[in-house]
């Protein structure tokens, strides 16, 4: 490129850079309002560095000037844009807009300085090849930053989930949440489901859902645990259950987020009941209570039924069934008869036998509670 053309372009460099920045901010929504403050300065410096590097390249013989500073600047710009939360699509749109404005203004200046047509064509070729290199470097920087920060954040989320499940002190859990850039919700709900259904479920759940991938104590083989943010309201629970329709998830209770381990423990106990399909643990609270300590329940059952031990096995079995039904139906003879498929008079006779065996204990609230828990 002739010296007078290069000089004319260099004289316009700052103005071209400013117009490119203004147009990017005006035309690319992700950059709206970025003119002021540190981000505006970063963008302006990046454009000036790119244009300055291009002029140095274009004025060297055969275009073989070193491009490393501009390429490195573009790479770092890409990393910075990723940290700012802008997408790679927004970054490439900024390059397209900037290249269009820069080419228009620089071509006008070059023509005004008397550039030959053949040189102008070569100039255009250099401009767009150079922009391609810069944009590729920025995309690489953007990708590397996302992968790097994504790995770090994922590790921090894993540490947060581990702290929640192991019952770490509240200050330690809060610190883990802050490191993971995770905003604590009103409540967390543990969900256990087959690993094959996790991807489908996550598309419908809150993006802040935690998914521990380290070994989780007690988790059945082939299953995964999700800790789903909710508000803890009845409406939020209905929404969560609706989102999990079509899965075999077991949904624990919604609890204050620092108590997520309690939700997970109940979810595991509910999963152990062996129920099919989508299971809401809130619908099975009685079964969970009765199955909390199987050996204690067996001892209670043996104590309640001890007065029947001396009867013939067939008689003891009939009276056990009658006692259970009589307790659950609050002594309503017709309901007991209907459940047991016997005549009401038969129920009267059997209840009479029970009164002979148990005496006044059938009217004792403490015994009635024990028997109900033992036989329910």
Image: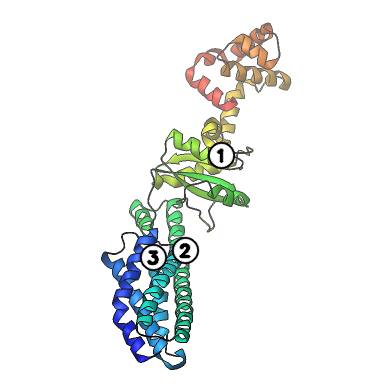
Q: Is residue 240 above or below residue 19?
A: above
Residue bearing mark 3: 83
Residue 208, position as x, y percentages in the image: 45, 51
Q: Is residue 228 left or right of residue 48?
A: right
* Tags 2 and 3 touching, CB below 8 Å: no
Left or right: 254 as drawn, with respect to 35: right
> Mark 1 or mark 3, which is nearer the start of the sequence?
3
In the rendered image, which residue does mark 2 sit on? 89
Marks 3,1: beta carbons within 8 A: no
Residue, far top: 345
Which secondary structure, mark 2?
helix
Separation of disc 3 and disc 1 at Cα?
Answer: 42 Å
The residue tagged with tag 1: helix, strand or loop? helix
Image point (41%, 40%), residue name: 231
Residue 83 occupies quadrant = bottom left
Q: Is residue 76 visible?
A: no
Q: Earlier in the sequence, mark 1 or mark 2?
A: 2
């Amino acid at each position: 490129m002739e010296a007078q053309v290069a000089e004319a372009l260099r004289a316009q460099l700052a103005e071209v850079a400013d117009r490119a920045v203004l147009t990017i901010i005006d035309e690319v929504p992700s950059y709206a309002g970025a003119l002021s403050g540190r981000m505006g300065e970063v963008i302006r410096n990046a454009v000036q560095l790119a244009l300055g590097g291009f002029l140095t390249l274009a004025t060297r013989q055969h275009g073989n000037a070193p491009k490393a500073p501009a390429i490195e600047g573009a790479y770092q710009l890409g990393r910075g844009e990723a940290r700012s939360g802008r997408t790679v699509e927004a970054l490439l749109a900024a390059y397209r807009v900037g290249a269009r404005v820069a080419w228009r203004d620089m071509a006008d200046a070059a023509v005004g300085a008397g550039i030959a047509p053949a040189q102008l064509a070569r100039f255009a070729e250099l401009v767009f090849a150079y922009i391609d290199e810069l944009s590729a470097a920025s995309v690489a920087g953007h990708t590397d930053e996302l992968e790097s920060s994504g790995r770090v954040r994922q590790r921090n989320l894993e540490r947060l989930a581990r702290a929640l499940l192991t019952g770490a002190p509240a200050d330690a859990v809060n610190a883990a949440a802050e490191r993971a850039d995770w905003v604590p919700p009103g409540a967390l709900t543990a969900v256990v489901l087959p690993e094959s259904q996790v991807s489908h479920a996550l598309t419908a759940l809150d993006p802040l859902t935690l998914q521990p991938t380290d070994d989780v104590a007690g988790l059945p083989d082939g299953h995964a645990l999700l800790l789903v943010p909710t508000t803890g309201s009845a409406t939020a629970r209905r929404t969560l259950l609706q989102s999990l329709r079509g899965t075999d998830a077991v949904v624990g209770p919604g609890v204050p987020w620092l108590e997520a381990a309690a939700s997970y423990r109940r979810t595991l106990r509910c999963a152990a009941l062996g129920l099919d399909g989508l299971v809401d643990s809130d619908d099975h609270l009685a079964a969970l209570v009765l199955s909390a300590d199987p050996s204690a329940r067996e001892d209670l059952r043996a104590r309640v039924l001890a007065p029947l031990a001396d009867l013939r096995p067939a008689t003891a079995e009939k009276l056990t069934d009658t006692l259970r039904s009589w307790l659950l139906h609050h002594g309503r003879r017709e309901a007991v008869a209907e459940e047991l498929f016997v005549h009401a008079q038969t129920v009267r006779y059997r209840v009479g036998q029970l009164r002979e065996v148990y005496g006044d204990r059938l009217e004792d609230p403490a015994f009635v509670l024990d028997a109900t828990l033992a036989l329910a």
